[in-house]
Image: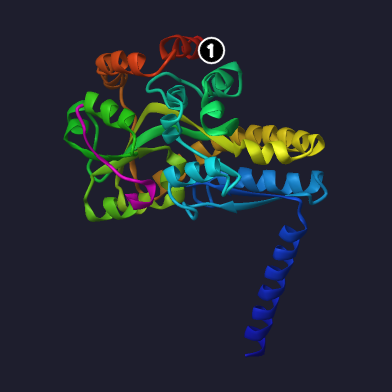
Amino acid sequence: MKKRTLIILLAACLMVGMMATVASAKHVIKVATYFAESHPLHKSLLFLKDNLAKDSDGEIVMQIFPNNQLGNEEAFIDSVKRGTIQMAVAGGLIKKDELMMALVEPPFVFETWKQAKAAYTGEIGKEIVGDYTKNTGVLVVGYSVNGFREISSSVPVKTPEDLAKAKLRVPTNEIYVKMFKAFGVATVMMPMGEIYNALETGVVDGQDNPYTTVQTTGWWEVQKYMLESRHMFVANPWLVNKGFYDDMPANLQKIFDENVKKAIDYNWKISEEQDEASKKFLLEKGLEITVPDPAFRQKMKDSLKEFYEWYFETIPHSREIIKKMEELPR
């Protein structure tokens, strides 16, 4: 009983200390994500949080809310626009306010991590922001990594014919629906938080996400197979409410900008490392991973001809920007 009382008192003291830290800070950043706490993205935000507190002498304090704690992606994007939270790490749904932002996830464009990093941490990353800030009052301060998307399933997928028989969950994003339709795949749109149950109950046969996400969400527990399709590389834009940013004095803006860059560099490094580690983990857990032969991947690519006709007509400047992406060193 005494031990339990001591634990409760220590927890209470810790909570009071955290509240005092937040209360004394001049600038509190609430940041929302849909990633798990074991994901490299969360680790990168912890890295940013520690460095911001240190370099600002406690004037900037971050509070991190992973796992959709502040709502799904659409909800927390809107919260940043309204200023009810100050920061979020988003995905492709950001395009609803600027279609060019769809270029954070173009299918079959990138072959290597080096090529993708050059695109999103260079001038292309700035170019695809378009009028997003003008339309929303939200800054895009950089891009971290989701990574190369693979397909997990409860049934083996070793051929294009196997893929066409599967029913897959996709994000609430018509780009994914049209892409998988081109592959001949039936899809079900649903938020990320509903995937585990849908896989477990057989509502869908599988889903597409990077190895790291499959590991950190626990989806491997209810899937037996993976196809290393690498059909899309996804970057995650970091969003910051512009009013909040503008309210910080110049010295704190500089500290914030420098540390965001450091955190994003750190994220790209650990994300690539974790991709390999997660693949190894999944193999050790008994998942069967199929690497498609060149003919299989080429058939997937070739099936996107009509998709890309629609894409180039829908997404402004996408033809020129994708050409720049494809020409980057690999």
Tell me where residue 266 sits by quadrant.
Answer: top right
Q: Residue at x 70, y 34 (%)?
A: 262
The secondary structure type at the circle numbered 1 is loop
Side (left or right) of 98 relative to 60 = left
Q: Is residue 192 magenta?
A: yes
Mark 1: which amino acid? Leu
Place of residue 69 in the rendered image (x, y in percent of width and height, measured from the top left): 49, 55
Magenta stretch: residue 318 in it?
Answer: no
Residue matched to label 1: 328
**What is the x, y in percent for residue 104?**
47, 27
Is residue 259 visible in this depiction of the protein? yes
Answer above or below: position of 217 versus 208: below
* Location of residue 288 in the rendering, given as x and y in whole percent from the top left corner: 32, 41
Whether residue 40 can be seen here: no
Nearer to us in this view, 330 or 31:
31
- Residue 178, how many percent across, how many down? 26, 27
